[in-house]
Amino acid sequence: MTTLIISPDITWTSRAQQAFIVQGLPCEVAYNGKDAQLMAYHKKYSYFVLDLDIQNHPALEVCKYLRKTCPQSKLIMTVVSNTKLDEMLLDEKKLLKMGVTQVLFQPEPESIVGAIQDIGQIRKWKNVQETGKPQEPDKDEEIIDSEFSRIKISELFGDALAVFDYYIRLGSNRFVKIIHKGEKPSKDQLTKYESSGTKFLYFLKKDRATFISYQNDLAKEMIKSSSANEGSKVVQAMKSTTDKYFEEVFTVGIQPNLIEEGKSICQNMFDAAKKDQTLSKFVNDLEQFNPAALSHAFLVSFFSALICKDLDWAGKKTVETLALGALFHDIGILQLPPEIQEMDPSQMSAEQFNLYQTHPQLGAEALKSIPGLNVGVIQIVLQHHEKLNGSGYPEGISGHKIYPLAKVVALADAFSYFLKEKELSPIDGLKLFLRNHDNLTWYDPILMKNLIKALK
Ligand SMILES: [Fe+2]
Ligand SMILES: [Fe+2]
């Protein structure tokens, strides 16, 4: 969690350093580029604040080095003025393309702490203090519907700290705050709302990123705890987290902190899949597993995790790559005309289907601009419609030429689509899926075996 401030300005850095100390945040300083690179080589920093005026290894060189050696860290570039950028034939966009997370113009040293905390909203909820006894609901307020995101009460963890306010919707643009930030709604309280006919709780969209990270952390804790025997609850929570995740991605774009959260969602999914007992119970419970109610991205990530859970080569890095590839595999569809986005491929005209088939390339292109993203993720997105016998698209490659993780997502994608189309549970669906001879020539037999084993 340490920040490295790289600036030649001794007064500015000492004030910034002081601001970090006041907030209890670890921070170190380098006064030239060479020292900064050496420090980054020997120690892991979460954040860098890099002054464009740094000497003895110019800032752009240092930036390149940092992006290469620690792509997961966040990098704030501080710049004196736009004139300085013009002189260097640079602009903000170019810096972002080089992997800079944020550009700040002549920031006050004290404001750097705030900027770091904003980027790291992942951890922000940890500062939420418990307020003690739950308060009475507030008076109803007029807030427009479009400011809210909603969550099924059944998908919330009971007895967990509310990291922002929750509302109930009374009618069009009317809401009442029922759970205040800092309260701990009990399971009983949530059940009471549910049994009185309230299905959803609402929260402000500005809190969505916090919601995602909080749910991720809770799921992680539950999976870790040896007493956790609530696999279905964890998967439900991850399902709602994935849904909110995509709402956020569609609203603000694929930001670096969202990439980190995407990895967490999937790591959790994978860890839950490894806990055979809890998950097979969930999968076997047909009532709870309703493919029609689950988002496609979630299902594909979920089945990808199931297929790979016992593979020897599935280390942490591979899981991350696979998970992000599964989450984003259809991101290119968003760039197609709206009428095609809505359409089922089986209903498309030849011309529409040709256009639809460009979505793997469109998705891969969109992801290429994200700094630090593993190329494997892009490969998965590009090849998720390739088939083992070469009859897929966009390139019609076959066998070992297909990236192994793309084969996993291809199978998970086809299986998810099949379940939704036939409205079947995974177990019934699998029997039918295996009866179709084409599927046996299109998808990797070892991966098929894994899927069968996982659903047994
Ligand atoms: Fe696709
Ligand atoms: Fe898909």
Image (cartoon, rainbow, N blue to C red):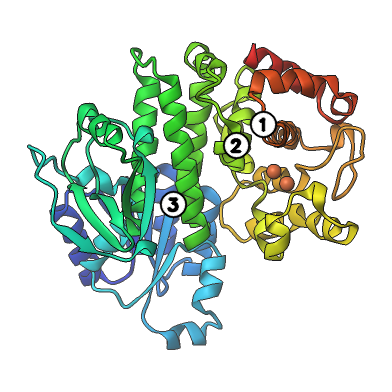
Q: CA distance from mark 1 to mark 2?
A: 7 Å
Name the spot of residue 56 as percent of width and height, x first: 44, 67
Contact between marks 1 and 2 (CB within 8 A): the answer is: yes
Name the spot of residue 271 as percent of width and height, x first: 49, 24
Q: Secondary structure at mark 2?
A: helix
Q: Residue at x 9, y 44 (%)?
A: 135
Q: Residue at x 26, y 36 (%)?
A: 196
Q: Residue at x 78, y 49 (%)?
A: 345
Crowding at dot 3, Cα within 10 Å, few <14 / some 14-19 / many 20+, comes out as some
Name the spot of residue 137 as percent of width and height, x first: 14, 48
Q: Which of 446 and 179 lies nearest the eye of the viewer?
A: 179
- Cβ(mark 1) to ligand 2 < 8 Å? no
What residue did someone put label 2 on? 292
Q: Is residue 277 left or right of residue 218?
A: right
Q: Secondary structure at mark 3?
A: helix
| Mark drawn on residue 80 | none
What residue did someone put label 3 on? 257
Image vertical order of residue 153 relative to residue 181, above or below = above
Q: Would residue 442 be seen by someone viewing this image from the given angle?
A: yes
Q: Which of 123 and 98 lies nearest the eye of the viewer?
A: 123
Image quarter of residue 134: top left
Q: Which of 51 and 292 lies nearest the eye of the viewer?
A: 292
What residue did someone put label 1 on? 423
Image vertical order of residue 232 relative to residue 264, above or below = above
Q: Secondary structure at mark 1?
A: loop
Q: Is residue 192 left or right of residue 347?
A: left
Mark 3 or mark 1: which is in front?
1
Of the residues under marks 2 and 3, which one precedes in the sequence?
A: 3
